[in-house]
Image: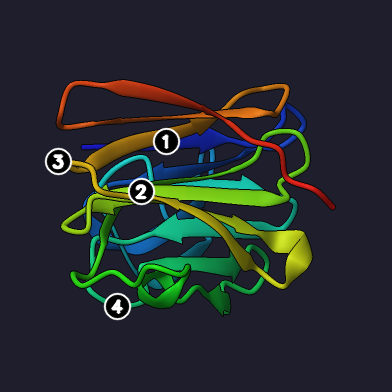
Amino acid sequence: FFFLMIRRPPRSTQSRSSAASDVYKRQVHGEKQPVKNIYGPYICGDAIDICDDQILTASWTQEKQLQTWDLGTGKIIQTFDWDNAGQVKSEDPAFLYSAQYSKIDGRLILAGGSNSNETKVFDRNNMDRHVCTIGDLTREIDTVDFSNKGGLFATGGGDGYVRVYSMNILA
């Protein structure tokens, strides 16, 4: 079964699929076998996104939860230090369910999950710097989303709330 399928712009014939699995598969429509596999991320939700030639994955694991990969080679580019990002350090490791690049330019990365019950934002244009943490939530974050025009992002989780946040990220 699939949790997620992401399609590139119409000129492409490639698609992305996500299920509770350690293998990310790149498959061309009409082919029975993937043309590329990425082993490593343990995907358990809306936790794959693509921007330019990079794949973002959020894993339901104690370590290496948030990573970027090269779409062409399948090799890891960056592992974010989730547990040590920000002024308030998480006592519990995060298990991520969701991640996304900002829609306008892919500059920001937003992710959230369980155990630590928090959402974090990272800035790709500033050496993947941690921008903010939204924590102290009573339940897990199951989904995150950036607005199409920028300036807003939303989270939703096990407490039944959808929270919308305004952001002003300076260059």
As shown in the figure, which amino acid type bears the numbered disc 1? Val
Contact (Cβ within 8 Å) of mark 2 with mark 1: yes
Mark 3 or 2: the one toward you: 3
4 and 2 marks in contact (CB < 8 Å): no
Task: Please tell me whether mark 1 sits on a helix, a strand or a loop.
Answer: strand
Give whichever of discs 4 and 3 has the lower sequence position. 4
Residue 54 x/y as whole percent: 65, 60
Residue at 51 percent across and 64 percent down: it is 36
Q: Which residue is mark 4?
A: 63
Q: Could you give the CA–CA distance between mark 4 and mark 3, rounded to whole angstroms? A: 22 Å
Rounded to the nearest whole Å, what is the CA distance between mark 3 and mark 2? 13 Å
Judge left or right: residue 28 versus residue 48. Answer: right
Residue type (three-letter) at the residue carrying disc 3: Thr
Residue 165 in percent (x, y) is at 51, 29
* Residue that numbered label 1 is attached to: 144
Q: CA distance from mark 1 to mark 3?
A: 16 Å
Query: Residue 138, which numbered label?
Result: 3
**Mark 2 surroundings within 10 Å by alpha-carbon count, few (fewer than 14), some (14 through 19), many (20 or more):** many
The answer to whether the residues at label 1 and label 4 have Cβ atoms under 8 Å apart is no
Q: Earlier in the sequence, mark 1 or mark 4?
A: 4
- Give the vertical position of 110 relative to 165 (above or below): below
Say which label, 1 or 3, has the lower sequence index: 3
**Residue beneath label 2, please?**
112
In the picture, the quarter occupied by the N terminus is: top left
Q: Which picture quadrant has residue 77?
A: bottom right
Q: Residues within 10 Å of mark 4 (few under 14, many from 20)?
A: some
Distance, label 1 to label 4, CA atoms, is 20 Å
Of callouts 2 and 1, which one flags the residue occurring earlier in the amino acid sequence? Answer: 2
Residue sitting nearer the eye, 156 or 39: 156
Residue found at x 35% / y 48%: 112
Q: Is residue 2 left or right of residue 163?
A: left
